[in-house]
Image: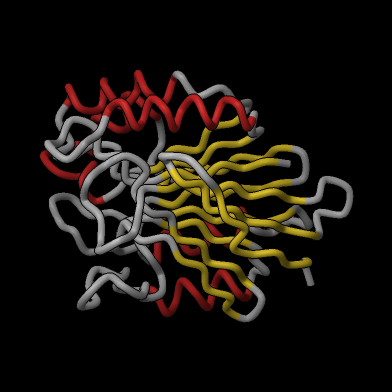
């Protein structure tokens, strides 16, 4: 089972590199993933034209299941309404061949700060009440990420969300937001942050990238995570057996 995790494409902003995103999409299609997860910041300002352009790019990705959730930039200028019109519900659940993915909206209108919210906790717990390999995707990072400067914008209820996800036996959490790829192992739960795939908004000496996750189909046991560099090349950054 192959899952591609891409984030922070920021279509239509001055730092956006359309040719690089085109290359990334071609690379993704060569990988032939069954699932693609996009963890937000599809746009820069949540404008209708930006959402439509982002939609055109995402439609070029060839896979069976696409999970798309909004980021803080998508919630600007009432953009959350545009997101719903084009991509559907802001929090969703998808199931595919023993994989359950809960996509969670962690945004607030016109604010960069993250917040999941107590009203979603029961829904999340219900989504994760399964023996499947459990994946949770949200835009905001739940744990500080190195090489990002002064910490800010972790969800206000990150502690409660982390406790909930660990208690529910979540296997993998996918985040974006900080434009820096990183992996944390918290009580056996892997938290994977994606960098930006196709903008020049980079931290020092950190190239554009996205993630490729491979999960053993027979036992849903071994998980491998590769950092795929947008301009070419890849790196195995994690290999772990499910507890």
Residue 28, image x and y in percent?
54, 31
Horizontal side of residue 212 vs 88, given as left or right: right
- Residue 187 is drawn in which quadrant? bottom right
Q: Of 64 and 241, which appears nearest the observer?
A: 241
Residue beneath the point at 63% across and 50% down:
213
Residue 90, image x and y in percent?
38, 41
Residue 232, image x and y in percent?
47, 40
Against 234, residue 20 (above or below) is above
Q: Quadrant of the N terminus?
A: top right
Residue beneath the point at 78% across and 59% down:
222
- Residue 48 is drawn in which quadrant? top left
Horizontal side of residue 40 vs 219, given as left or right: left
Q: Of 133 and 228, which appears nearest the observer?
A: 228
Residue beneath the point at 38% across and 55% down:
176
Residue beneath the point at 36% across and 31% down:
21
Residue 20, image x and y in percent?
34, 32
């Amino acid at each position: 089972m192959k899952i591609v995790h891409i984030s922070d494409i920021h279509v239509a902003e001055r730092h956006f590199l359309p040719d690089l995103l085109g290359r990334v999409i071609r690379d993704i299609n060569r990988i032939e993933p069954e699932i693609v997860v996009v963890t937000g910041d599809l746009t820069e300002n949540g404008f209708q034209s930006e959402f439509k352009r982002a939609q055109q790019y995402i439609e070029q990705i060839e896979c069976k299941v696409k999970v798309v959730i909004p980021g803080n930039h998508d919630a600007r200028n009432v953009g959350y309404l545009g997101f719903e019109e084009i991509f559907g519900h802001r929090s969703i659940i998808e199931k595919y061949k023993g994989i359950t993915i809960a996509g969670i909206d962690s945004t607030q209108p016109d604010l960069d700060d993250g917040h999941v919210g107590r009203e979603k906790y029961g829904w999340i717990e219900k989504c994760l009440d399964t023996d499947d390999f459990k994946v949770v995707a949200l835009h905001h990072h739940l744990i500080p990420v190195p090489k990002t400067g002064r910490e800010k914008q972790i969800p206000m209820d990150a502690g409660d969300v982390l406790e909930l996800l660990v208690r529910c036996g979540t296997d993998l959490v996918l985040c974006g937001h900080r434009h820096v790829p990183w992996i944390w192992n918290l009580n056996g739960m892997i938290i994977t942050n994606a960098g930006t795939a196709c903008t020049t908004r980079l931290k020092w000496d950190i190239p554009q990238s996205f993630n490729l996750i491979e999960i053993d189909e027979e036992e849903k046991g071994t998980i491998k995570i590769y950092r795929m560099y947008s301009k070419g090349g890849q790196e195995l950054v994690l290999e772990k057996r499910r507890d």
